[in-house]
Image (cartoon, helix red, strand yellow):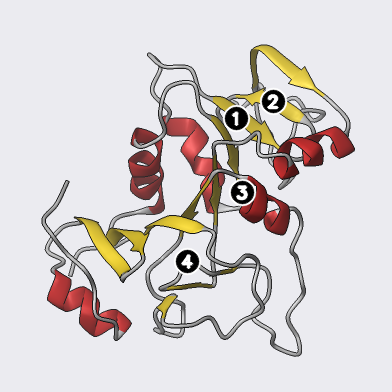
Amino acid sequence: MTRISREEVAQRIAADIPDGAYVNLGIGAPTLVANYLPDDIEIFLHTENGLLGMGAAPALGRIDPDLINAGKQPVTALPGAAYFHHADSFGMMRGGHLDICVLGAFQISQHGDLANWSTGAPDAIPAVGGAMDLASGAKEVFVMTDLLAKSGESKLVTACTYPLTGVGCVSRIYTDHAVFDVTPDGFRVRDLFGDNTVEVLEKLTGLHLQYSGLE
């Protein structure tokens, strides 16, 4: 059973972002997408701490300690980039100005509900940040995550059991095994990686998956 790396998942997401899109990359693995965006199109990356026009991660030795994303990782700024107040940044997020946001997840339900800020465990540290604002404000929500949690349980579920970030907000899920679309009839397999099959994915997730051929 083949799994692809997070870097390869990031490349797959980058290939699906259209020219001219305004995009927010969530904290953690989604920030990798910035390193794989095509050079021949223009995509505007937004970070919620107040930057529009974010570039890829800087090379070693060229890090500006004052230039970071919302996850406190060093980033670059492209020519024409704009800096603004945190409140203005959240206004962009909440006002429907972002075409796509890419977020991590603990669970995604077959209805497109997202849980990504807390497992609800007594010792869990809540870290919602701007995820709720992004989930409700972006025109499309892409999720980047492993298909299985460290415990071996599927992150794709019939209904979320963790505290929700957003209801019916997720449109597509990119995992290390396959890409899934959220449809009115549940999850639809959009793309398979390596030797994975729909039957294998159904066994891993315990779900009936829609499938009508790869795109």
Q: Residue at x 53, y 52 (%)?
A: 29
- Determine the CA span between mark 3 and mark 4: 18 Å
Residue position for label 1:
45
Q: Which mark is on residue 52? A: 2
Q: Residue at x 36, y 39 (%)?
A: 11
Q: Residue at x 51, y 27 (%)?
A: 21
Which is closer to the viewer, label 3 or label 4? 4
Residue 120 in view (yes/no): yes
**Which of the two discs, 2 and 4, labels the residue nearer the N terminus?**
2
Q: Are marks 4 and 1 in contact (CB under 8 Å)?
A: no
Q: Does residue 52 sit above or below 86 in this rendering?
A: above
> What amino acid does circle 3 point to?
Gly
Residue position for label 4:
112
Q: Which mark is on residue 192? A: none
Q: Is residue 25 left or right of residue 64?
A: left
- Determine the CA span between mark 2 and mark 4: 28 Å
Q: Residue at x 75, y 65 (%)?
A: 127
Residue position for label 3:
26
Q: Are marks 2 and 1 in contact (CB under 8 Å)?
A: yes
Q: Are marks 3 and 4 in contact (CB under 8 Å)?
A: no
Q: Does residue 70 sit above or below 116 in this rendering?
A: above
